Image: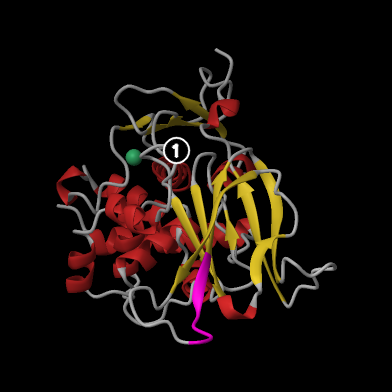
Amino acid sequence: MIDYQLANVEAMKIAVHLHRRLETDLTMQVDVYSAIEALDVDLAFLPLAQLSGAYLPASNETGGRPGILINSKHPRSRQRYSAGHELGHHVRDGARLGRLVDRDTEVHARSAALVKDQTEATAEAFAAWFLMPRALVAHFLRTLGIGGEPTAMQVYRLSLSLGTSYVAALEHLHTLRVVTLPVRNRLAKVTPRWIKSQLAVHGPADSWGDVWLVTEDDHPRSFLSPRSGDEIVVELKEVPSSGYVWDLVEPPNHLEMVASEFEDDAAGRVQVYGGEGRRRIVFRAARPGHERVKLAMSRPWEPNRQPVRSFALDVRVEPRIETALLPVV
Ligand SMILES: [Zn+2]
């Protein structure tokens, strides 16, 4: 019999304690891989056939160091969750239980029947609490302007900020009592694929890719961490009759602009003078690296183009697959 309540409370305590020890910045996506390295645990990404991840306690075989293996073929959010799960084994179980292999991680939301025992239930809960500490979730809810009952699209946007899957974020919002059980059950029926199709203009490079929406209502400190191939849609208010148009201040190095189009809020209705609309500037994350993309609103025909408004987004494009971390075997 698995005591989920106990697993949850124990996992939360261990995660809170570890974040304190690591002095984690709880206003940024949790860097689980840096945490693993900070604890002197070896980390490797391997194309595993049947496993999500594994924890290898320190032994002669491992050169006296503990190690964590992650399946390099899994999507990024799943890899991060597996890394959290294995880190949970390291912190809680250490060498006590020997080698631990995990066929499945991030299972709780899919089926509780997939959780094997108390140890696994705690490792799963630890991954959730470590990647989604209460203070960080509250921070992102604020910066994304989410108050009250979130929509599926808002949960998706939150999951991108947290670096987890939609399902894992939704499940944890329920644990945190941000959403009630009926809301959780309703939102669980919505697929990320559908949400992405609603947000996308051209769509990401492949079905694993994500679509990041950025609006003026977002907090100025919002930070995006797309992978190469992801789509970024920036929506900014524009008044066509004013002649002011949003445009890039300079071409970005790590993103490619694929479209800049205007959508009339009154589309299909009678256009009123001074009616508002939205400029939608669409980017494709191209080359890994960090940059600040600046946009300004000015009149294109004016010689010095003095901007009346400006907007910036911090973007860190991550590599497509973490092959750079593959060890030489
Ligand atoms: Zn496990």
User: In the image shown, does 217 or 158 lie closer to the viewer?
Assistant: 217
Q: Residue at x 42, y 82 (%)?
A: 271
Q: Is residue 183 left or right of residue 143?
A: left
- The residue at the far bottom in this view is 273
Please indicate, yes or no, whether residue 9 appears anywhere in the rendered image: no
Q: Residue at x 52, y 34 (%)?
A: 320
Q: Residue at x 57, y 75 (%)?
A: 238
- The residue at the far right in this view is 304
Vertical placement of 325 versus 167: above or below? above
Q: Residue at x 22, y 60 (%)?
A: 188
Read off the residue under disc 1.
Answer: 205
Please indicate, yes or no, whether residue 177 appears anywhere in the rendered image: yes
User: Per the image, is 213 magenta?
Assistant: no
Vertical placement of 145 versus 113: above or below? below
Alpha-carbon neighbours of circle 1 within 10 Å: few (<14), some, or many (≥20)?
Answer: some
The image quarter containing residue 300 is bottom right
Give the image quadrant in which the ligand numbered 1 is located. Answer: top left
- Residue 174 placed where, x, y %? 29, 69
Vertical placement of 17 versus 179: above or below? above
- Residue 22 placed where, x, y %? 62, 56
User: Per the image, is 278 magenta?
Assistant: yes
In the rendered structure, which amino acid carries the disc numbered 1? Ala
User: In the image shown, does 284 or 127 lie closer to the viewer?
Assistant: 284
Q: Which residues are magenta?
A: 273-279
